[in-house]
């Protein structure tokens, strides 16, 4: 089963077990810890008193009491002291121990908060990376459904560098898209408006204009290519010579067929592919068994990412599912950013999509 990043209140999530970001006493505290104890009621505190506390990096299990889950796993994360005192090792241990306890109890679903990222001060982007690393490693051999639950999109940081690069890519893409939509005779004055800000010195203006022109140039066919394309026979004119029945006999390779072909070409197994795509086994079985199956756009893109397809092949595969990447859609631009930069880490992509309030990949 996949890993899901969701926004919400972990105390209200219906699953087999939730993880409490506890302190060593296990007797409650602030933040997530206090909220879980409050929602569970007195019974949870009474059971915790019998456990004798818990060491940092370890976890212990109790009943869920008034919570909508069967179990609460109390994991004690490290306090951040600069990163040189074994904090990462201890945090990784928290996730591993929690997953092991859930598996031992036969849990089919488990929800984590972002352990140690609150009052314990662990940097949120690093805490999230540790969480996804350990959970993904575990899910390679398990069908458990695992959630990472954050209160809101500002509860973690994907990193200033990545966030800034994606924002710039989105801005540039919207600008180029708007520029290409304008008739040629109107582009020159528009370009001056876009590239020449009144409060910029001449050197900055020239640099911005050069960058803009380079992007505009690369986003459309050059004159020779356009002439060559226009000289080709119109496929719709050719199609009119055939009947609809003839055309349907020559239907192209479907999304499902291309997916299975690419899996074989990449030397992957089905399991490797659907796990990399963050898709569950049941959905993959539907796609495999029905050559005309039409997945959602997020699922189709998830498989593009799993297969590490370059942009032209990615667009071809999406087209077979009936989709396209648009320069007028923030979700599509973010996906294109990661593909162009050959970053196929689906969980990092989902972190970025989450931060920008977009739908996530997989299911």
Image (spheres, grey):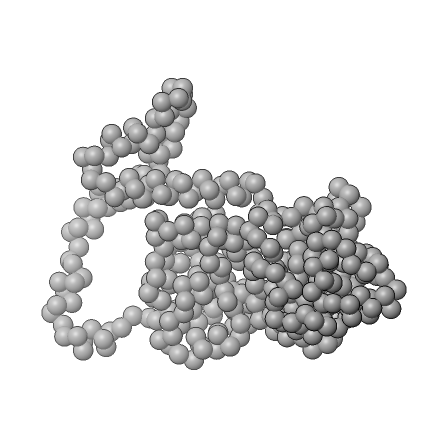
Residue farthest to the left?
241
Residue 246 shown left or right of residue 80 in the figure: left
166 lies above or below 101: above
For this rendering, which residue is in front, 27 or 162? 27
Q: Position of residue 250 (x, y in %)?
A: 24, 74
Residue 165 shown left or right of residue 61 in the figure: left
Q: Position of residue 131 (x, y in %)?
A: 66, 57
Q: Position of residue 23 (x, y in %)?
A: 79, 56
291 lies above or below 313: below
Q: Which residue appears at 34% of the width and 40% of the height?
A: 175
Q: Which residue appears at 22% of the width and 43% of the height?
A: 224
Q: Position of residue 112 (x, y in %)?
A: 66, 62
Residue 32 shown left or right of residue 178 in the figure: right
- Residue 105 placement: quadrant: bottom right
Q: Which residue appears at 23% of the width and 75% of the height?
A: 248
For this rendering, which residue is in front, 137 or 14? 14
For the image, the number of numbered tags is 0
312 lies above or below 287: above
Q: Is residue 177 visible?
A: yes
Q: Is residue 135 visible?
A: no
Q: Which residue appears at 74% of the width and 75% of the height?
A: 104
From the image, which quarter does the N terminus lie in? bottom right
């Amino acid at each position: 089963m996949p890993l899901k990043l969701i926004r919400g209140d972990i105390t209200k999530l219906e699953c087999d077990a939730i993880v409490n970001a506890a302190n060593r006493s296990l007797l409650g505290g602030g933040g997530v810890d206090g909220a879980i104890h409050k929602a569970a009621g007195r019974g949870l505190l009474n059971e915790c008193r019998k456990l004798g506390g818990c060491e940092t990096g370890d976890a212990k299990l109790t009943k869920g009491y008034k919570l909508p889950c069967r179990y609460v796993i109390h994991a004690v994360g490290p306090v951040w002291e600069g990163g040189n005192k074994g904090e990462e090792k201890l945090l990784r241990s928290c996730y591993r121990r929690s997953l092991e306890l859930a598996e031992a109890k036969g849990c089919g679903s488990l929800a984590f908060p972002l352990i140690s990222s609150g009052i314990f001060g662990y940097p949120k982007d690093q805490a999230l990376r540790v969480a996804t690393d350990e959970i993904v490693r575990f899910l390679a051999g398990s069908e458990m459904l695992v959630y990472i639950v954050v209160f809101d999109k500002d509860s973690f940081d994907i990193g200033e560098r990545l966030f800034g690069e994606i924002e710039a890519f989105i801005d540039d893409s919207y600008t180029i898209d708007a520029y290409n939509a304008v008739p040629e005779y109107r582009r020159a004055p528009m370009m001056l408006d876009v590239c020449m800000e009144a409060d910029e010195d001449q050197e900055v203006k020239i640099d911005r204009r050069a960058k803009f022109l380079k992007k505009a140039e690369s986003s459309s066919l050059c004159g020779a290519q356009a002439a060559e394309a226009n000289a080709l026979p119109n496929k719709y004119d050719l199609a009119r010579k055939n009947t609809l029945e003839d055309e349907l006999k020559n239907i192209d390779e479907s999304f499902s067929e291309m997916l299975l072909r690419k899996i074989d070409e990449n030397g992957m197994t089905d399991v490797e592919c659907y796990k990399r795509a963050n898709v569950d086994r049941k959905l993959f079985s539907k796609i495999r068994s029905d050559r005309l199956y039409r997945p959602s756009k997020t699922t189709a893109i998830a498989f593009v990412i799993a297969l590490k397809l370059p942009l032209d092949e990615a667009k071809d595969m999406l087209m077979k599912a009936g989709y396209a990447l648009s320069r007028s859609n923030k979700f599509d631009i973010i996906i294109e950013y990661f593909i162009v930069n050959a970053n196929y880490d689906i969980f990092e992509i989902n972190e970025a999509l989450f931060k920008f309030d977009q739908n996530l990949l997989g299911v």
